[in-house]
Structure formats: C-alpha cells, structure tokens
Amino acid sequence: MAISILAAAILTTACSGQATTPGAASIAASRPSASPTTAVLRSPTTSPAELPGGRLVYAQWMGEVGSLFTTNPDGTDTTPLLPVGDPHRWSPDGRHISVVAENSDGRLFVGLIDPDGSHYVQFDSPDPTLDLGCFAWSPDGSRLACEGWDDTDLTRNGMYTVRASDGGDLVRVTTCPNSCHDIPTDYSRDGAQIIFTRVTLPDEADATLMVVNVDGSGARALTDRKIGGGRLSPDGKTILTDSKGSLLLVPIDGGEIRAIEISDGGLETALSPSWSPDGEWIVFSGRASKSFDLYVVRVDGTQLHQVTDTPVGKYEDAADWTAAAP
C-alpha cells in the first residue's frame, strides 16, 4: 500500500522481517530536528531517589526505524515492547498501551499491548481506504481519537474517534480544510472536548493548536501563535507543548504563554514533553550533544534528571507517563 507522502513515512522492514512503522510526519509527536533552537538548560542534579514513581513508554529511533520501550522514571527496568515507533499512549488505567502500526489490511490503525509486552492485538481497520492514527484516549478509556487521511480522497482528511476495545464505531469529528491534517493530542478531563493540532504539510511549523467538542462543534484556536500539539495537565488547566527547542505552558482558557526555563543541564534543546500523573513533573526529549535522551524535570524547571543514555546514532522521544502500571 502506498502510504500518503503527506501523512506517513514508508513502512520499513526490520532484519527480523517484522514490519515497523517509523511514524507518520503528521501523527508523530514533535520529532527532533537537525538544528534545534537553543534553550536555557544546564546540568542534571536530581538523584533517582528523589524521583516520583510510575512508568514511562517511549520510542527509540535509529533513522526511520523505531522500537517501543517502557522504563521507570529513573531509567531502571527497561523493557522492549515492539519493533514499532510512535504514536503510542498509556490507557487511563495503565493496563494497555495504544500503538499505531500497519494492520493486516495494509492500513495504519491502532493496536493494544500490555505493559509487559504481552498480548499484542492489532485491530482491523473499520474503513477500506482510510488510514487512522489512533492513540489519544478518552478519560474513561472507552474511545480513541485519531488522525484520519485518505490517499484517494483528501476531503476525508480530518479527526475521527473509534471504540478503544476493538477499533469499531468510527465517528468523524472534523473536516480539515485544504487537505490539511487534524492531529489529536488529548481529551479534556470531562471527555467533552478534544485538543488537536491543525497542520498544513509539508511545513510542520504551520501548526495551529485547537480544541473542538467531541461532536465536531465549537472548533476554535487556543492561540494565534504557531504552536503544535500539546498534552493537557491533570488539573485540566494547562497545555504542555514545545516550540523552537523550548517547553511551553499554554493556559487552555487564555492568558500568557510561559516558557519553562530549566535551571540545570547542559542541554541544547527540549521537546516532545508530557506530564507526570500528578502534574508536578515533566518528561521530555532533550539533546546535550549529538544524541537525544529522555529527561524528567519539575514543572518549575528544577531538579532535572537524565533517564536514558542513548548511543550516538539513536534518539528517543514521545515519552508518556502513567502511574504504576499493573
């Protein structure tokens, strides 16, 4: 199947013969760039004993080939899951991880895997010509929000939702004008709205952070700045995102957008952030020299700690944090 050059990279076959998805340009979380803008960061100071608990899931990349892992916030007990990259996301109860990959019909769609790497199930696509990048869970765990696109009919580009249990009950939420792409990133805490990014490819910087009701009504931009996808804080008040190598806090109801100035680290850039379950910490991908690793830091920019130590030639991003998984 020819994956849309606007929305997805070509599937790559690993040495094992298993299909791997490097992650669509449109649905992947903010990917490290070749020349990131410098952020205000210096050297890690927090010891593992001071870190909160829970579990991270993240993608590790070598070129366009990605693999999925879980680890503790201090970098211990790292477990490989799948030879598949992002998008991915913990379910609200921490019992499953949603993964976007190619299914038996040759379409990108969602599958579920248990946190220990067992019981992987790839769902059949509910539509014969629609690719669906589904990964953002509703708060009650019943639905997944998806980016959808159709190589044969660009008027079908937009945001959709499906039932999380089996990938059925496809519902269209938005229609993206001028063949752009609507990429969901989170639900509101009451499940009534979806936060998403409207992107005009191939310029991924041409992005608008938006919110819409789950029935498709009331779509609006949250800021006039060109900002991409973001994660909603556990208290439902603030969207965490990144721009030009810095982490940003965007009030969902308006107000000043603030950059997080990380006080220690020696890093050059910070991107692809996500909240800790209690909303007091952030996990993100950062670059200190030639590689991107995962870091955690408090929301006020203090107590930076490096989680992974990635060999040159690989990088890690799109981490998602859950409370202790079963």
Image (cartoon, rainbow, N blue to C red):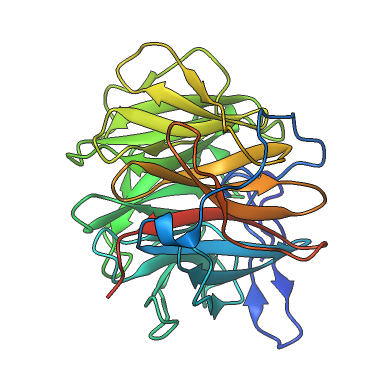
Name which residue lies at 31% across and 51% down: 277
Q: Residue 287: x, y in percent?
A: 72, 46
Q: How many marks?
A: 0
Q: Residue 317: x, y in percent?
A: 60, 54
In the depicted structure, whether residue 241 falls above or below residue 293: above
Residue 286 vs residue 296: left or right? right
Name which residue lies at 70% across and 40% down: 267
Name which residue lies at 49% across and 77% down: 77
Q: Specify whether residue 199 is in view.
A: no
Residue 12 vs residue 35: left or right? left
Name which residue lies at 29% across and 66% down: 94
In the depicted structure, whether residue 198 falls above or below residue 320: above
Out of 247 and 295, give the one closest to the viewer.
295
Out of 129 and 114, give the one closest to the viewer.
114
Q: Specify whether residue 158 is in view.
A: yes
Residue 280 vs residue 128: left or right? left
Out of 325 and 13, give the one closest to the viewer.
325
Q: Residue 266: x, y in percent?
A: 72, 40
Q: Residue 38: x, y in percent?
A: 74, 29
Residue 202 vs residue 54: left or right? right
Task: State which quarter of the image contains the N terminus.
Answer: bottom right
